[in-house]
Image: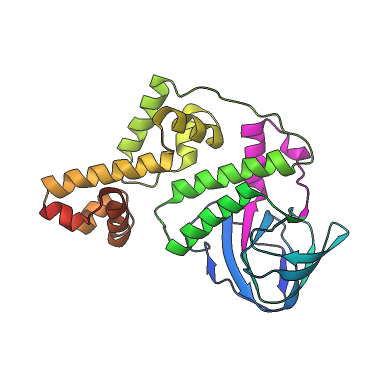
Amino acid sequence: MKPLATQQIECACLPVSSSQSQGWEHILVEEFQHPSGEGKTLYSHEHVICLSLTPRPVRFLQIKDGKTHTGPYGKGDISLTPVQMPFFARWQGDDHYLQIRIASDFIDSVASEALAMNPDRLELRPEFRTRDHQIESIGLMLLSELKQQNVGSKLYIESLTNILAVHLLRKYSASQPNLARHEGELSEPQLRQVLEYIHEYLDQEIKLANLAQLLGISQFHFSHLFKKSMGIPPHQYLLQQRVERSKQLLKQTDQSIVEIALECGFNSHSHFSKQFRQLIGITPSTYRAS
């Protein structure tokens, strides 16, 4: 993430949790909790979504794009502030929200590759209090990953980031995008090429961009076509294959569980054990003993 040009929040609150150290690309997700106060922000490289998590509505006064809005924000309410737009807020009551900052240059690339839009003419509309069930759902999934600190699920985060970007462009762009559709499924040669790549680099970090680039299509459309072809999203297939390889190594070698975890692309013993147990129902050590 590029640094923000200015960020001034008078209550000087720090996030309760942040994806800053988790290596997520193109997106920064932070959870905040703070008492009554006021603040102003301007982000020069990111569009900003705020999703209210507060159980009790908090009354706000907000100013952006020359407009003023007053009223309560409750759980599920969303605001959208486009890049380079000054924003001021004053609130009464204990606030709790999720802030999602998505890089504007990433939005531009998605607009061009997935929606055939001219990024030079791209403009998102600001929103005060609104409801958007898809953004709320994506936000809660990102929050869940943030809480669990699943540093091994970057392919999943990339998929969510792409879905969020396309949704923002479809619903909040000042000009209506023309969706460049890719119908059907991946062809057999395409699917074979992707699966061979995944199996060859199973021990390394595999990015959505790597897989989409193999076929020369956008990340968003690759995810859609892969799921149509395989019945599951790319990140779930990758996890399944890593666990399958680990099962072979647990049975056929004397390698330690830590060595097997690293050889199968997991970043730690604990992350490997957690994912293995979720899929297989028992721990790696129990599976080896059985």
Q: Nearer the viewer, residue 158 or 131?
A: 131
In the image, is 280 to the left or to the right of 288?
right
Whether residue 256 can be seen here: no
Instruction: Reply yes or no: does residue 100 show up in magenta.
Output: yes
- Colouring chosen for the image of the structure: rainbow
In the image, is 263 to the left or to the right of 119?
left
Q: Could you tell me which residue is drawn at 68 percent across and 62 percent down?
A: 4
In the image, is 125 to the left or to the right of 77?
right
Q: Quadrant of the N terminus?
A: bottom right
Magenta residues span: 98-127
Q: Could you tell me which residue is drawn at 30 percent across and 40 percent down?
A: 241
Residue 276's x, y, as percent? Answer: 28, 52
Residue 99 vs 245, above or below: the answer is: below
Looking at this rendering, what residue extends furthest in the right direction? 66
Q: Nearer the viewer, residue 6 or 125?
A: 125
Q: Nearer the viewer, residue 111 or 175?
A: 175
Q: Could you tell me which residue is drawn at 13 percent across and 47 percent down?
A: 251
Tag count in the figure?
0
Q: Could you tell me which residue is drawn at 43 percent across and 20 percent down?
A: 187
Whether residue 59 can be seen here: yes
Residue 274 vs 174, above or below: the answer is: below
Residue 179 vs 120, above or below: the answer is: above
Residue 210's x, y, as percent? Answer: 46, 38
In the image, is 171 to the left or to the right of 150?
right
Instruction: Reply yes or no: does residue 196 show up in magenta.
Output: no
Q: Quadrant of residue 98?
A: bottom right
Residue 43's x, y, as percent? Answer: 71, 60
Residue 27's x, y, as percent? Answer: 58, 54
